[in-house]
Image (tube, rainbow, N blue to C red):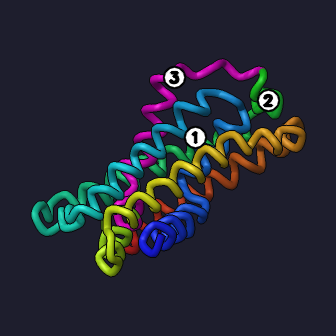
Amino acid sequence: MTSFLPGFLLSLSLILAIGAQNAFVLRQGLMGRHVFAVCLACGLSDAILISAGVFGLGRISEVLPAIVPVMRWGGAAFLFAYGLRSFWAAFRSSDSLDPGEQAPVPLGRTLAVCLALTWLNPHVYLDTVMLIGSVSTQYPSQAEFGAGAVLASFVFFFSLGYGARLLRPLFARPMAWTVLEVIIGCVMWLIAASLVFGG
C-alpha cells in the first residue's frame, strides 16, 4: 500500500480536472449512450499510457523528437474542430439538444471520437507517461504504484459515466444542454490554445 495508494491518489488528482476526455464521458453518460464502451476505452487507454510511463517508455520524445510538434499541432487542430462542433450544437434549435430526440451515433464513431480525444491530446502523455512514470521511480514498487494509478483511472471514468445519470433531471431542460455544450466548447478551445501558445 505504500506504493499503491500514492499512485491511486496522484492519478485521481490529475484526472479530476475537467478536460476533453472528461467532458466527452460526461456527455455520453448524460445521454446514456455507449457509456460502458466509452468508459472502458478511456480506462484502457490510460492503463496503456501509465504502464508505458512506469516501465520506462516516458522518454519517447528523446527517441523521436519529431513526434512532439506533430502531436501538438494535430491535437490542437482536432480539439479546435471538436470545440467548434460543440458551439454549433449549443446555438442550434434548443429542441435538437434533447438527447431523446437526437439520432443515435454508432458505437464505432463514438469510440473513434473518444480515442481521438485521448490519444491526440499531448497533455494526456504529459500526465500519464511523463509525470506518473517519473514519480513512480520514487516508490519501492513501481508496479504497485502503476496499478494504483490505473485503478484510479477506471474508478473515475466509470463513476463519471454512470454517475452522470444523477444529473439527468437537470438536463431535461434544453437550456442545460446549451450551457454544457458551451462549456465543452470552451474547454476544448482552451486546451487547444494551450497547445499552440504553450508549446
Closer to us: mark 2 or mark 3? 3
Image-based side of 168 in relation to 88, left or right: right
Residue 122, above or below 41: below
Q: Nearer the viewer, residue 146 or 158?
A: 146
As drawn, is 11 to the left or to the right of 47?
Answer: right
Q: Mark 3 falls on what kind of element?
A: helix
Image spot of residue 154 (x, y percent): 53, 48
Q: Secondary structure at mark 2?
A: loop
Main secondary structure type of the part rendered in magenta: helix
Q: Which amino acid does the dot numbered 1 rest on? A: Arg
SS for dot 1: helix
Determine which residue is flagged by label 1: 85
Which label belongs to residue 98?
2
Residue 63 location (% of width, % of height): 10, 64
Classify mark 1: residues with Cα within 10 Å, few (<14), some (14-19) or many (20+): some
Q: Are marks 2 and 3 in contact (CB under 8 Å)?
A: no
The three-letter code of the residue at mark 3 reads Leu
Disc ID at residue 133: none
- What residue is rendered at 44% in x and 55% in y? 150
Q: Nearer the viewer, mark 1 or mark 2?
A: 2
In the rendered structure, find residue 107 and report the number of the disc placed on it: 3
Which is closer to the viewer, label 3 or label 1?
A: 3
Place residue 25 in its image quadrant: top right
Q: Are marks 1 and 2 in contact (CB under 8 Å)?
A: no
**Residue farthest toward the left in the current orientation of the protein:** 63
- Which range of residues does the magenta coloring cover? 101-127
Residue 105 visible in rendering: yes
**Labels 1 and 2: the sequence-earlier one:** 1
Q: Give the camera-side residue of 86 and 39.
A: 39
